[in-house]
Image: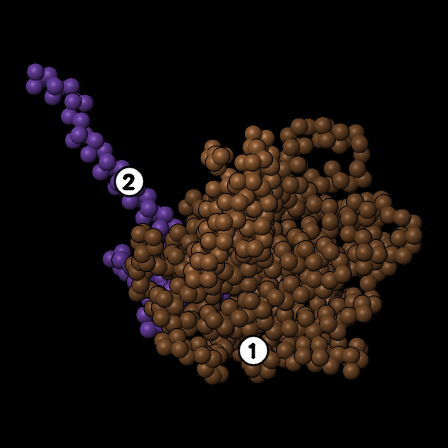
Amino acid sequence: MYIVNLILPLIGSIITGIFGHKLGNRISIKIAVGCMMLTAISSLYIGYEILLCNSVVHFKLGTWMQVGSLNVEYGLLYDSLTSIMIIVITCISSMVHLYSMDYMKEDPHKTRFFSYLSLFTFFMMLLVTADNFVQLFFGWEGVGIMSYLLINFWYTRLQANKSALKAVILNRFGDFGLFFGILLVFLVFKSVDFSVIFTIAPFITEYTINLLGYEVNAITLIGSFIVIGVVGKSAQLGLHMWLPDAMEGPTPVSALLHAATMVTAGVFLVLRTSPLLSYSITILNILTIIGALTTLFATTIGIVQNDIKRVIAYSTCSQLGYMIFACGLLNYNASIYHLTTHAFFKALLFLSAGSVIHGLNDEQDMRKMGGLVNLMPLTYQCMLIGTLALTGFPFLSGYYSKDIILETSYATYYWEGTFAAIIGYVAAFGTTFYSFRLLILTFFNKPRMQYKTIAGVHEASTNMVIPLVILALCSIFIGYVTKDFFVGLGTPVWNNSFFAYPYNNLILESEVLQRELKLLPLFAFIYGVITPVLFYFNIKEDRMINVKQNLMVKESYFFFVKKWYFDFLSRVLIVVPFFHLSYDVMNKNLDKGLWEKIGVTGVATTLVTAFTALKLKNEITLSTYISYIVQTIILIIVVGIFSFMTGFIYMELCIIIGILYICLPSIKID
Amino acid sequence: MTGHAPESTFNADGSRKMIATQQQCEDKNLPLSFRDYCAHLLIPLNDCRVSTYYAPWKCMDEKHAYEGCQYDEYLYRKIKKSEQDEAERIKREVVIEKENPKDRPYEEIKLS
């Protein structure tokens, strides 16, 4: 059951990818979709065994490599965290596969698309089921490569090429950090197995590593590199630039990779290594601050975006910040809870946006949409449900998971938690603002499309509607149904999946917070609905004129549109110097130019330059010139005799001396 | 099982009484941070959760009893914190008095 659960996506990918054209598009795609749905069903059964029947599964499949004390084995670890992750991954992937059957129907390369999608799911499951760091890293790299291939699926588009390269390069920086973290883990623990590492961690909390003369705590150093990996994969502040541009891929790719699965790999890594990272307060504070700032950053930029998919992408970035700072506050089950609910309603939003784009003949600018509420009523309903769940409307999924993160942030009573809580409450308002702005511009306002486009608007087909309805039902109910399961007081589900010091019991403290703090998200929601209605609902110039003329509004808008100048700074400080170094210095002068500079061409050029300079000196008479030439010839003859004995370099040296002799104008021999 | 009058966690002399034993907590896999004086109510709650597959609309009696116990613990912590703060304040005042004997003018007059 467990091995089949892991292998089925790979089998579907191989059959579709290699034999797709022999079997025919229709049959091979159905094989891929069928394999994925079987995987989802087996994941649910595994979840029943592990989560409800409380039996953790851990087994070894064989030895991968054994070199000295390094012993890497193929092992699968199915505990509570893994079970939740594989249920989320396979259910969302099944919905996306089913949706893509019609969305990619007219694409000539759809077998390749389904092969990539299944292979991505395999790597993601490899990542979450690994029982050691090396196997986890293999899955981690795999999802990065598949991200490149899927973003660049329409590889004839230049913007898709650039976005895919951006994604893979920025992920590479994060992967580099994780790689160093794994090396340090092996250096300190002499093992890469999770069970060994997490057992030993409590006994080496005082262990230090001498780094450039400073004694650095080992766990803090390991954690700092792991945090770099988390920042890269989960698009946190600093390495976040790839996520909005990843929207160049097909919309099902955004729904799967950039809403539910790949971007949560960083959160998963923090949760998986929580028995290690919990011993470093510094790393936890760094995670809190990075997550909170990412939430604020992504929310403010999402407010000013006009591409429907980029608004949702920045929303994903913001929600990932919530998950990361919840982890930083040792609130692991609230983080996994939000990860789970967010996967469903964000996938719903992306797929609904895909229906809108599909119906509008691939238009993505919200300013050229409007009036779709009557033309696409089912898509509108799904989008509305997803939006309400995302914004934390009472008793929908996001209400339960987001509010508990905000309340427990305040309940820490430390400045990091208060900092994160304030930003979280502000971001809750911002989330509501841009989400309802999206709804108003897309569905409610007067249409701003061409008549030909309006005539062609159509609702999604059956295979696209079924996943939307299923995800909508999940967005409504899954938060309530699983509340006691994830974050109930004293729930026994998690066993040893997470570790936090016992006196950090935030959920208990959050039960007794002041009422004002519990009602604050509701007020954020109300203001977040009213504000875009006032400003965007059938826009009137007299109402907007004061806003447009306000200097602070204009400067703020520009600052947000420029993405807080992160792209500009990274270009000026990193990209341009890097290109100068790699091309002008390394490529031209070293790789290609070194032997030319000191070889035949260089010598000839130098001689020509010298003689040309010599010819410009008018004070030298003809007799002096002839005298120099004769002496040079004599010198070369003499040197030529010695060159047979001393070699090329000596000849070079003598020639250089001769050149210097020629160029000394003060010497006169008459 | 729990009824309207749950077993008290205080002994007759006012000291705390741990009803659930350490072994019971370990047998039931209670999370470390929840092995407090309400653990004896959490054990049946978790049993009920597992048997009803964590349905949030079930186990209301056990949940209510457990949350009531936790709320009483919270109030007890508030009382203890107030007492502790008061003791700290009194101690601080005594220290201030010792450090500033000149605040009492009759002492100064006597010395002069």
Q: Nearer the viewer, mark 2 or mark 1?
A: 1
Residue drawn at point x = 72 percent, y = 70 percent? A113
Indicate how the structure is coloured in the image: by chain
Can residue A274 be seen at all in this image of the molecule? no
Q: Chain of mark 2?
A: B
Q: In the rendered structure, which amino acid carries the disc numbered 1?
A: Ile
Residue drawn at point x = 82 percent, y = 63 percent? A460
Q: Front-most of B59 and B14?
A: B59
Residue A325 is left or right of residue A463, and the answer is left
Q: Front-most of A369 and B47?
A: A369
Q: Count the labels in the image.
A: 2
Rendering coords of residue A575 (x, y %):
58, 48
**Looking at the rendering, which quadrant does residue A430 occupy?**
top right
Outermost residue, left side: B111
Rendering coords of residue A254 (x, y %):
68, 60
Q: Circle 1: is it few (<14), some (14-19), or many (20+) Cα within 10 Å?
A: many
**Looking at the rendering, which quadrant does residue A186 occupy?**
bottom left
**Looking at the rendering, which quadrant does residue B35 occupy?**
bottom left
Rendered purple, the chain in question is: B
Residue drawn at point x = 53 percent, y = 78 percent? A49
Residue beneath disc 2:
B86
Residue beneath disc 1:
A46
Q: SS at mark 2?
A: helix
Image: A668 above or below A206:
above
Residue drawn at point x = 30 percent, y = 60 percent? A207
Q: In the rendered structure, which amino acid carries the disc numbered 2?
A: Glu
Rendering coords of residue A178 (x, y %):
48, 62
Q: Chain of mark 1?
A: A
Rendered brown, the chain in question is: A
Rendering coords of residue A124 (x, y %):
58, 69
The reply to whether callout 2 and callout 1 are in contact (CB within 8 Å) is no
Mark sitting on residue A172? none
